[in-house]
Amino acid sequence: MGIAGLWDKWKSPGGETVHSFTMLTINADQYPLMNLFHKPTDEKRMVVILEPEQFEDWLQAPATRSMEFLQPFPAGGLRAG
């Protein structure tokens, strides 16, 4: 498994190279496992989990296809430990 993310490098005003990244999340209000970790009144969020066979597709996908990947991971595939 992997987590979908975005990254970039840029120059700071001081001239330093800065590497930035983010892990993508989606709404998980209806995801059973996430209800165990969030207060009832809070929005539930979860990272976008990718299967290994999706890694290359994610890395090569144009922005117009990115929404295809932003799906909840099958609930039976995750467990809290």
Image (cartoon, rainbow, N blue to C red):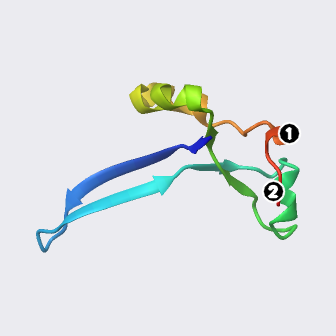
- Is 42 displayed left or right of 56 in the figure? right
Residue 68's image quarter? top right
Q: CA distance from mark 1 to mark 2?
A: 13 Å
Work out which quarter of the rendered image holds the C terminus and state it. bottom right
| Element carrying mark 1 | helix
- Residue 31, x across and y down, in percent: 83, 48
> Which residue does the image show at 75% across and 61% down from the upper left?
43
| Element carrying mark 2 | helix
Q: Which residue is mark 1?
A: 76
User: Residue 67, which numbered label?
Assistant: none
Residue 27 lies, with reference to residue 1, above or below; the image says: below
Pointer 1 local density, CA inside 10 Å: few below 14, some 14–19, many at least 20 = few
Label 1 amino acid? Gly
Which is in the foreground here, disc 1 or disc 2?
1
- Is 59 displayed left or right of 79 in the figure? left
Of residues 53 and 59, the one nearer the viewer is 53
Residue 67's image quarter? top right
> Which residue does the image show at 62% across and 40% down from the upper left?
1
Q: Residue furthest bottom?
A: 14
Precedes in sequence: disc 1 or disc 2: 2
- Residue 6, x across and y down, in percent: 42, 47
Label 2 amino acid? Met
Badge 1 vs badge 2, beta-carbon distance below 8 Å: no
Q: Residue furthest left?
A: 15
Of residues 1 and 58, the one nearer the viewer is 1
> Which residue does the image show at 88% across and 50% down from the upper left?
32
Q: Which residue is mark 2?
A: 34
